[in-house]
Amino acid sequence: MARERHVAPAERPQAYSDAIFSIVATIMIVPLSGEAVSEIAENENLLAGLGEIWFKLLVYAISFGLVSSTWDMHAWVFRMIEKVNETIVLLNLGVLMVATFLPYAFLMFAEHPREQLAVLLFSGCIILQGIFMLAILWHAYSRPNLLKTELVQKGEEEMKFQRTRATVKLLIRPIIVIIAIPVSYGSIEVAWALLVLMTLKPIIFIAVDAIMTCVRGNVQAGTKLLKLSRLYSETSDVIRTNAYSDGVYAIVATLIILDICVNNVPHTGLVDIHGTLAEALSRDANVFLSYSGTFVTICLLWYLHHSIFYHIQAQNSLLLNFNKLALMFAGYLPIVFKLTGEFGGHLVHNDNSSVAVQLNSGTVFLASIWLLVIWITAWCKKSELLQPSAHDVRDCVFMCLNLLIYPIVSLVIFCVCFVVPVSSAVINGVQIGLILVFILLKLLRNWTQRFVKAEEPRKSPEIDEEVANVKTEPEEPSKEDQEGIDNPVEIESTSL
């Protein structure tokens, strides 16, 4: 009874964990965005500046993938857990504490990639996370009242196998980093290659899972696990995916205001030079226009993501990885905002404005095209992944039109920059104006739905009249009925 008293549903710890992971995955772009603009300002050349920070931008992509992979593992473990006690809550806080330290470890990697201490720091974070996650798993399996009911009903033997299977999956990443630590003393490049290999953990686990199944004696089932169809045959719910994605988009939309609060608030001396506060603010008009365009873009990308997952009832591995790519490229938008806002200003020459516009449009294209890929993937397996209400072809067409707006517009602007110079004000104005395009497309969809309902074939009037006549014609009483009417006493006795 004492154990039951401290047991609570697992929803709130999961929601808190989703928030932490989304913040950690996105916040790592903040120091990189500040360094990007400062280094480009020193060179006064966008391409040269990007050439100097390309490795740091790549580190952000790798770190985003690894943090997202950690979140995916966390969600996978908690799919087996229905309730939590104080021990699991505290162990989960340990996982989150190590996750919040990952941005520092990745920045050490970006600044000192050839230092063994950077490898040890990053490896230590991965090992600690694995230990905490493994402790959560084993503690939950030692308390069957914490596990999902359907898992407990499978029996003790199946529970032991699932625990072993989950343990192997959790140990893949710690084993890789344990191998990378001694390797770093001989070759730093090989050690980092092993650490990057952790992004292939799902493929490694598929092979290990197949071997384990074959060892149990089920060779046929183990062989099936090696098929690529497993990437889209196994499904799970999208509740935590929605929460994690909402967190990433919300944080990206909020980060773009930080630079304005720090760098674009006129001080007293600047106001005295320009005469009025309005004149001092007009000096940063490009920055405020870029903020508006970037904020609208992030919000509309979230709107598209919300529209897609409103119709999705389950996800497979392909859909989950495509969603991670869409979020990762959305995470680059704070850097894009800062570069686009500063071009045409006082940091860099306006000759590079077209390059900034291409960088902006290219990032938006990559952040939006993966949303289209998500929808196509879900539609190809609509019987398993989509809600039954989303199987209509007309709804699919309008969804594709919505998802094609950003890729087409971004690609057109990107190509136009090769022909004629395009200022940053143009792409920001286009991004703000796309709100009207989405509104018009929504009105067109509503009008089409009303028109289709009005044109639906109705029943023929002649058929309706025949049906009415059949219902109103009195039936001729049978011989037994006539006898019953002539002899009411018999009816009463029979009924009694």
Image (tube, rainbow, N blue to C red):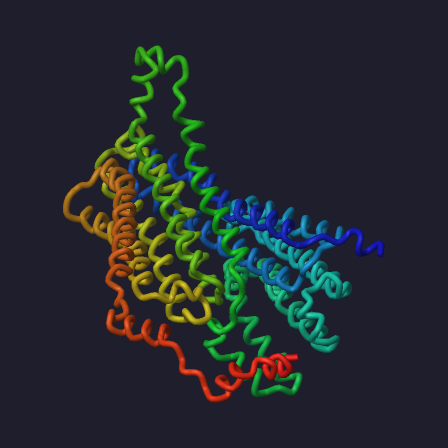
Quadrant in the picture for the C terminus:
bottom right
Which residue: 23% across, 42% down?
Answer: 354
Q: On the picture, is 365 further left or further right than 25?
A: left
Q: Where is residue 438 shown, x and y percent of the image?
A: 29, 47
Which residue: 43% across, 71% down?
Answer: 383
Please identify the residue farthest to the left as the structure is shown: 419
Q: Relative to 329, does residue 169 appear above or below in the rendering? A: below
Which residue: 24% across, 35% down?
Answer: 425
Q: Where is residue 32 shown, x and y percent of the image?
A: 45, 41
- Residue 117 is at least partly visible in this image: no
Q: Foreground residue, 415 or 385?
A: 385
Q: Where is residue 374 shown, x and y percent of the image?
A: 39, 61
Q: Relative to 43, does residue 189 appear above or below in the rendering? A: below
Q: Foreground residue, 70 or 294?
A: 294
Which residue: 67% across, 68% down?
Answer: 167
- Give the image quarter of residue 170: bottom right
- Residue 301 is at least partly visible in this image: yes
Quadrant in the picture for the N terminus:
bottom right
Q: Where is residue 263 shown, x and y percent of the image?
A: 41, 27
